[in-house]
Amino acid sequence: MKLGLLTSSRADYGIYQPLIQFIEKQSCQLEVIAFGAHTSIAFGNSVTEIEKTFNGNIHKLDTFKAEDSSEGVALNYAKTAETFSSFWSDNKFDLVLCLGDRYEMFAAVSAGAFFHQKFAHIHGGEETTGAFDNMFRHSLTQFCDLHFTSAEVYSQRIAQLRGSLKNVHTVGALALDSLSIFQPFTKSEMLERFKVDFSIPSILITFHPETMLEDAGRSQLSELIKTFKSIENYQLVITQTNADIAGLAFRKIYEGFAEGNENVRLIESFGLKGYFSAITHSEFMLGNTSSGVIEAASFNKRVINLGNRQKGRVVSNNVTTLSVEKSLILKEIERIEKLPEEKIENIYWKGGAVPEIWNAITNYLA
């Protein structure tokens, strides 16, 4: 059995980790296909993280130019499809795993359709109406042969899109499988590795462009920076943006805000263990990232989810969604501070995704 795994960013590679570790122990050949932001210096050159953790064959494809305008992102899309046209011509797999909703992921998969390459899609069927990703996710569903969803409602949506529940498996959120063996870095280790002192009460912040807005969320970020300046008694730990429209513009704003501000720590990439450790040691999360919706509940962390980027996803009771307004955010922080600690149930945990994914793959290819 020869399997491929498509990864275009540090975010999806982190989610894949428990599945990669499992497959590496099986009698099959697994090859990683890294492209997109992974090979971009401007976005951290995160392919180096893959090289540190994966011992198999890594295909490194240059599909990305550091452009964050609409035209630049469209050209990245076109370059990705062109590059993968050659790649799929020269490489054949029994099945290729893809994940999520990125435009570059769709470009890679859609190019493979012309070569009759079979794909398995993880995290399909979800809704995020505040981002272009929503259309690419549903388009990926149409191009893939096998589907692994994080909740039953998403499986039903795939059935609506494809007309059948055949080859659709509700397995829960894959990243949560990592928690069964997860041991966080200590606060002293986080200080040594990432120069972030979590002995100081901290807010973990990830806020990406909201690409369905005409200004891609630039005005939202301006309001958020004003809010940050009014937050007292917390260290602000900000993780950098994805390669979206306005992604580079957001990065520059964050860099300018962090420069000379001792209360702000700007992080390019924690890696999966580092990021989960950051969630563990933070007081709560703030922003518009899917990790706040999907993973945070398993850490018993409250989340202030901002804007419409995640609109449509089902959420656990730890998530409060607000518009990006300073007064609302500050009021919600005050409310969270008064809440007692309690056990939060994560609706995305189904008991372990990896065994179900593997069984479905082997049965499909049998």
Image: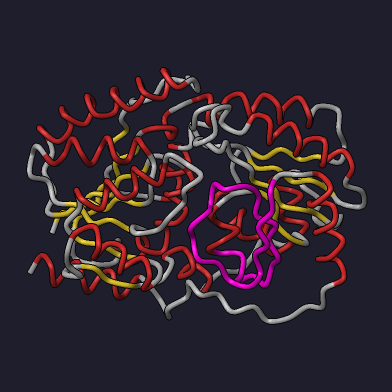
- Magenta region, residue range: 295-323
| The stretch drawn in magenta includes residue 315 | yes
Quadrant containing the N terminus is bottom left
Q: Is residue 92 left or right of residue 209?
A: left
Q: Which of 24/220 is in front?
A: 220
Residue at the image point whose x is 14% and y is 51% from the top = 118
| 131 over 291 or under it: above or below | above
| 304 over 71 or under it: above or below | below
Write down the quadrant of residue 365 in the picture. Answer: bottom left
- x, y percent for residue 258: 78, 32
Q: How many marks?
A: 0
Q: Is residue 308 left or right of residue 227?
A: left
Quadrant containing the C terminus is bottom left
Write down the quadrant of residue 148 in the picture. Answer: bottom left
- x, y percent for residue 144: 20, 53
Q: Is residue 290 left or right of residue 84?
A: right
Residue at the image point whose x is 59% and y is 42% from the top = 269
Residue at the image point whose x is 43% and y is 55% from the top = 127
- x, y percent for residue 24: 30, 61
- x, y percent for residue 192: 74, 48
